Image: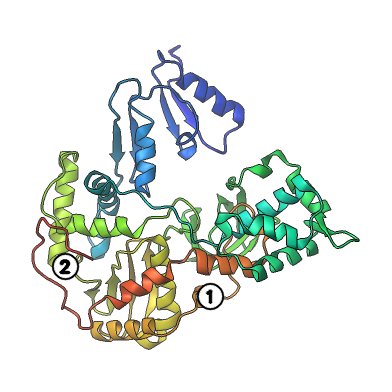
Amino acid sequence: MGEPDRFLIHHGNLSASFRQTAEELMRDENANLTTVTTSTLELGIDIGRLERAFQIDAPFTVSSFLQRMGRTGRRGQPSEMWFVMREDEPEARALLPETIPWKLLQGIALVQLYVEERWVEPPQLDGLPYSLLYHQTMATLASTGELSAADLARRVLTLSPFHRVTTDDYRTLLRHLVETDQVERTETGGLIVGLAGERVTNDFRFYATFAEDEEFTVRSESQELGTIVQPPPVGERIAIAGAVWVIEEIDYKRHLIECTQVKGKVPAYFGMCAGDVNTRVLERMRGVLRETRGYPYLRTNAQARLEQARHVAVLAHLASEPLVCVGGTSWCLLPWLGSYAFLALERFLKIRCADKLGLKGLDSSRPYFMQFTMSADARTFYRVVKEEASLPLDPMELVYPGEVPRFDKYDGFVPDELVRKGFAYGVLDVEGMLARVLSWPDVPGCATRALPDTNLSPI
């Protein structure tokens, strides 16, 4: 009784005063405190000397792992970071891939990639950042005043992030901004910030290009279920109120989501958000399953759990063949692809291959595996998907009808056609997906079935 509170909280939805109080207390060298935080303390804030960091489950990236660990061990002390992997005991009737400790494999893969290769995710420079394009357009007009469309294009499109943006795309954006009063055309034909645009640019939050969490109310018919932030696009599923729901409609102006209850599980949706797991991480996870050696940083239970997973993987050929039958017409596909290539493959199977394979009920646990039933056998599966992958594929084919996948802060000011294009050509890794599909065997069972050795076999 009478003891001061030794636990602090820090996350983006808290008021600035609460966050500042937590930061000030953490700078006190004599304080013995524990802070529960999101990634808000990861960058750019002086939080003094941290003794150690605890990460719930594995981070998504090597860079995030290094950044978080680097916040500890200052002033001569070694850095110390612990991974706490949460895992329920697999049910007796759980399907094979659900018995693998994916988060444990991911955590090991992140550590090993850096320890062995000093590998960190490369910067992504080939996107189509239309949200940022809007921001730079409005910022340029707000700072310079009236400009002709040609002068504005010369100032903005020459910036390196927009090297893939065409003049036609920019023309489409400017027309839309004029139509929505974000930009106004003067009597002399020049462009200035419009009345609606002034409300955006005059807000102090305008110059931050990262999206803030905005709550969306979730409803099913007349029933209000709760709220979520960063909703996935129409057609994806969410978990709320103890059930699973498929999103039918999103009203971004009213922050309202309409949904319908369905059965099944909810895969994590990876758009332009923290779920970006690189393909290299998934490949190293496969290597962890294939190896036989231990890792000195694992505790006893984690090492035992890894050995159990390796035993299962050898018996079921999970690390040697991409397609595994899990009973009858039920199949599991393990492509070992990063988040955006995995998402492209999921859509490719649904749109290009499902009818020819009799494929139904595709259920993803992104980016680890997907399960489905199909009337075809493994030989037919490989033949069909490789034939389809050999044909020309426009990434726009993989965007669902009516889908407008908004992820970035200013996507709401960008015309729908550009948002769709940015997702298809700048987010989905179609090239990586097709390369992996074409590398699969022509005949089932031709992948190696030997016991794993200590060398990491190439993917």
Q: Distance of mark 1 from mark 2, alpha carbons?
A: 36 Å
Asked whether the viewer can see residue 91, the reply is no
Please, what secondary structure does the residue beneath circle 2 have? helix
N-terminal of the pair, mark 1 or mark 2, is 2
Q: Give amino acid for label 2.
A: Ala
Residue placed most toward the observer, 323 or 423: 423
Residue beneath disc 1: 396
Q: Position of residue 53 (x, y in %)?
A: 35, 32
Asked whether the viewer can see residue 399, the reply is yes
Binning the other alpha carbons within 10 Å of mark 1 as few (below 14), some (14 to 19) or many (20 upward) gives: some
Q: Give amino acid for label 1.
A: Met
Q: Is residue 381 above or below residue 286?
A: below
Hey, which quadrant is residue 371 in on the image? bottom left
Q: Position of residue 304 (x, y in %)?
A: 14, 47
Residue beneath disc 2: 316
For the N terminus, which image quadrant?
top left
Q: Is residue 241 above or below residue 41?
A: below
Hey, which quadrant is residue 177 in on the image? bottom right
Q: Quick check: 84 left or right of 3? A: left
Residue placed most toward the observer, 141 or 17: 141
Residue placed most toward the observer, 411 or 135: 135
Identify the residue at horizontal 68%, vertical 55% (top origin): 155
Q: Position of residue 234 (x, y in %)?
A: 56, 66
